[in-house]
Image (cartoon, helix red, strand yellow):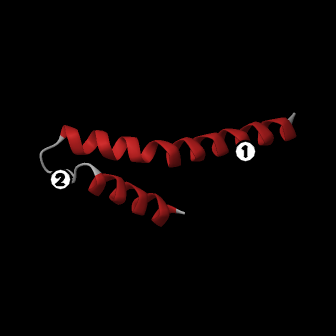
């Protein structure tokens, strides 16, 4: 039973980590649109910024 609990916890942490990595660009875009002090880039500049941020996380 303890092994099953550890396997479930490991799987849950992996799912949370993958979700966080994939959702971070969407969250950055939403934050920049929601606040006046957010990222002021648009179009290709925003795509470049998000790409560089994702590469820096890896």
State which quadrant residue 49 falls in. bottom left
Instruction: Please state the horizontal and vertical placement of residue 17, each as a whole percent of the image.
Output: 58, 47
Instruction: Please state the horizontal and vertical placement of residue 12, each as a whole percent of the image.
Output: 67, 38
Residue at screen point 46% across, 58% down: 54
The label shown at residue 10 is 1
Outermost residue, left direction?
Answer: 36
Outermost residue, front direction?
Answer: 44
Return the residue nearer the eye: 51 or 20. 51
Instruction: Give the residue number, with chain letter if any, for mark 2.
Output: 40
Mark 2 touches mark 1? (CB < 8 Å): no
Return the residue nearer the eye: 1 or 56. 56
Q: Secondary structure at mark 1?
A: helix
17 sits to left or right of 6: left
40 sits to left or right of 46: left
Disc 2/disc 1 C-alpha distance (Å):
38 Å
Return the residue nearer the eye: 49 or 57. 49
């Amino acid at each position: 039973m303890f092994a099953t609990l550890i396997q479930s916890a490991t799987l849950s942490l992996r799912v949370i980590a993958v979700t966080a990595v994939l959702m971070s660009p969407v969250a950055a875009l939403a934050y920049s649109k929601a606040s006046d002090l957010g990222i002021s880039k648009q179009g290709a500049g925003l795509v470049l910024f998000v790409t560089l941020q994702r590469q820096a996380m890896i």
